Amino acid sequence: MRLRRRKNQTARMEKAADWLISEWQGKTDRLLVELGCGMGRFACETAEANPDVTVLGLERVPEAILIGMEYAQQKGLCNVRFILGDVIELDKMFAPGEIDELYIHFCDPWPHWKQAPRRLVARNFLRLYRPLLALGGTLRFKTDNAPLFAFAQKELAAEGWTVTHCDPNSPPEAVMTDYEAKFRARGVAIGALTAAP
Ligand SMILES: C[S@@+](CC[C@H](N)C(=O)[O-])C[C@H]1O[C@@H](n2cnc3c(N)ncnc32)[C@H](O)[C@@H]1O
């Protein structure tokens, strides 16, 4: 995601800094982590609707994450936080078995075959996620990109994950990401799956 620097970005990041963490050290009954959370709409709205869970949004673009931090601050949401960083460093941010649900929504498809290892559902990433998931933990993936949806299923099968739910034309859910809302408004089919390691 390429975004222009926000007006007064540094000051605004500082003002909302309580919603930014570098690694998870807290305690919670249920930890949900969204990878590549963009502007944090899903993370914030999920936290708002589920006060008993903690939601963490990980994103590498500060211009995007700032919007989520500010929304959470305005709403006084105590159970959502954001991490500015790269998914590749996930094992430095979380301890083994710590994450209950991992969400990947509309990740970059990296269409060229040589770019496959950059896709967040590629086997190299699945190997990173597996030990971080709690017993009974799941990975939830959504995309508008049919080849990427097929690729995710292939990678999950190759890594021995169990797909417990798979729908290439999934119905809308109560909480959507910005990308999902945009694609659904255009009538694009959204593939959704849930998998367990
Ligand atoms: C296409 S956008 C989707 C944003 C959001 N998930 C949604 O559905 O509205 C993909 C997002 O993932 C982020 N992203 C991609 N690769 C990442 C990585 N390796 N680490 C952290 N964020 C990443 C991008 O910066 C971008 O904000």
Image (cartoon, rainbow, N blue to C red):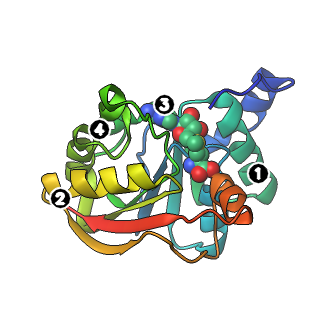
Q: Earlier in the sequence, mark 1 or mark 3?
A: 1
Instruction: Give the position of the C terminus as an image quadrant.
Output: bottom left
Is residue 19 or residue 84 the one in the foreground? Answer: 84
Q: Secondary structure at mark 1?
A: helix
Alpha-carbon span between mark 1 and mark 4: 27 Å
Looking at the image, residue 64 lies above or below residue 169: above
- Cα separation, mark 4 vs mark 3, equals 12 Å
Please give the residue where the numbered disc 3 appears in the rendered image: 85
Q: Which residue lies at the image location 51% right of the left edge and 74% below the top edge? A: 170
Classify mark 3 as within 8 Å of ligand 1 or not, answering yes or no.
yes
Determine the image quadrant of residue 9: top right
**How far, Cα to Cα, is label 1 from label 3?**
19 Å
Label for residue 103?
Answer: none
Where disc 4 sits, the SS reads helix
Q: Is residue 22 visible?
A: no
How many neighbours does mark 3 have within 10 angstroms: few (below 14), some (14-19), or many (20 or more)? some
